[in-house]
Image (cartoon, rainbow, N blue to C red):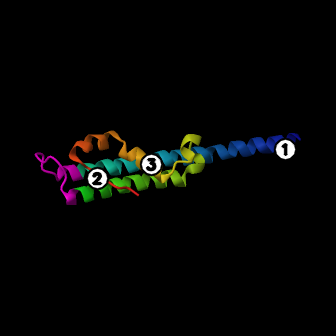
Amino acid sequence: MKKTCLALFILGISQQPVWAASAEQYVHAVEKINENYQQDTRNFFNTLDPMQRGFTAEQQVVFCKILSKYADDLYQAADSNRAYLDKQYANISKKDVIVQVLSSKEMQMLKRYNVQCNLN
């Protein structure tokens, strides 16, 4: 019995670094995704005329592609690390990620420019 308890205890301890490493990898992946998104949007906004009051159809397509890639990347990071996420995030769906992205502060600010992206 003591050997069984000891084996379970050791097994539990040996699994802890794997979980921590994977959770850390997830955090790093999300940080990298956010950095890429910020760089992509910064580059996009730098191409716009400061006096324009909205996006052209072409600009909206480009912006929506950036936003779609961001949502896809966030979902992929969550999906590939589900086992290491808190219970509230472990069952996150792609639709949940899209809702979060579309309800972000940035998107709320862009509503006045009639920016609408259909992310799937």
Upstream in sequence: badge 3 or badge 1: 1
Q: Nearer the viewer, residue 62 or 8?
A: 62
Q: For the residue labelled by badge 1, is the local secondary structure a helix, a strand or a loop?
A: helix
Which numbered disc covers residue 77?
none
Q: Secondary structure at mark 2?
A: helix
Determine whether the residue tagged by mark 3 lies in a helix, strand or loop. helix
Report the Cα–Cα distance between label 2 and label 1: 54 Å
Q: Nearer the viewer, mark 3 or mark 1?
A: 3
Instruction: Based on the picture, tell me whether residue 87 belongs to the magenta stretch.
Output: no
Amino acid type of disc 2? Asp
**In-front residue for pair 66/34:** 66
Q: Residues under labels 2 and 3: Cα distance?
A: 19 Å
Circle 1 packing at 10 Å, graded few (<14), some (14-19), many (20+), is few
Determine whether, in the image, residue 23 is placed left or right of residue 31.
right
Dominant secondary structure of the magenta stretch? loop
How far across and down, in percent of the image, does residue 86 sit?
Answer: 57, 41
Of mark 2 and mark 1, the one earlier in the sequence is: 1
Q: On the rendered image, what quadrant is the N terminus found in?
A: top right
Query: Left or right of 52: which side holds 100?
Result: right
Q: Tell me which residue sits at (31%, 47%) in the image.
A: 38
Q: Residues within 10 Å of mark 2 (few under 14, many from 20)?
A: some
Which label was assigned to residue 40? 2
In primary-sequence order, the first of circles 2 and 3 is: 2
Residues under numbered marks 3 and 1 in contact, where contact means CB atoms less than 8 Å apart? no
Image quarter for residue 16?
top right
Seen as rendered, the residue at the extreme left is 51
- Residue 97 disc label: 3
Residue extent of the magenta highlight: 44-59
Which residue was labeled with disc 1?
A: 4
Q: Residues within 10 Å of mark 3 (few under 14, many from 20)?
A: some
| Vertical placement of residue 92 versus 59, above or below | above
